[in-house]
Image: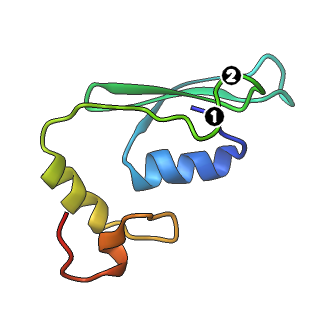
Amino acid sequence: MPTIDQAKAREFYCDFLGFSVDFEHRFEADMPLYMGVSRTGMTLHLSEHYGDASPGATVCAPMLGVHAQHKELRTRCTAMAVLGSCASPGATC
């Protein structure tokens, strides 16, 4: 997955979605970050390297317990949230 700001990527993937950082790699201190995050068996690789992924790419991730996940995310509604249910109390998916 492409990223351009590691702080925003951590805020979204770790703080909002609940992923944990598995690894971080940079060739040098001032080089782009390549980072792996995971949650309950799903692993994503996030990269600031130009050309590693296409912005706007789609990832399909089959999952069990999607309603429980949705309920969990609703408790974390922040400026990062793009879930319509965060802005609409009582909305259902």
33 with respect to 78 (left or right): right
List the residue tagged with mark 2. Answer: 52
Query: Where's residue 50, x and y in %?
Result: 78, 27
Task: State the colouring used for the structure image.
Answer: rainbow
For label 1, the SS is loop
Query: Where's residue 16, x and y in %?
Result: 42, 55
Residue neighbourhood size for the residue with mark 1, other residues' Cα within 10 Å, grouped as few (<14), some (14–19), many (≥20):
some
The picture quadrant where one finds residue 73 is bottom left
**Mark closer to the chain start, 1 or 2:** 1
The picture quadrant where one finds residue 25 is top right
Residue neighbourhood size for the residue with mark 2, other residues' Cα within 10 Å, grouped as few (<14), some (14–19), many (≥20):
few
Query: Where's residue 29, x and y in %?
Result: 83, 27
List the residue tagged with mark 1. Answer: 2
**Measuring 34% from the left and 74% from the top, which residue is drawn there?**
86
The kind of residue tagged 1 is: Pro
Find out whether the residues at labels 1 and 2 contact each other: C-beta distance under 8 Å.
yes
Asked whether 87 or 21 is in front, the reply is 87
Q: Which residue is the extreme one toward the bottom?
A: 89
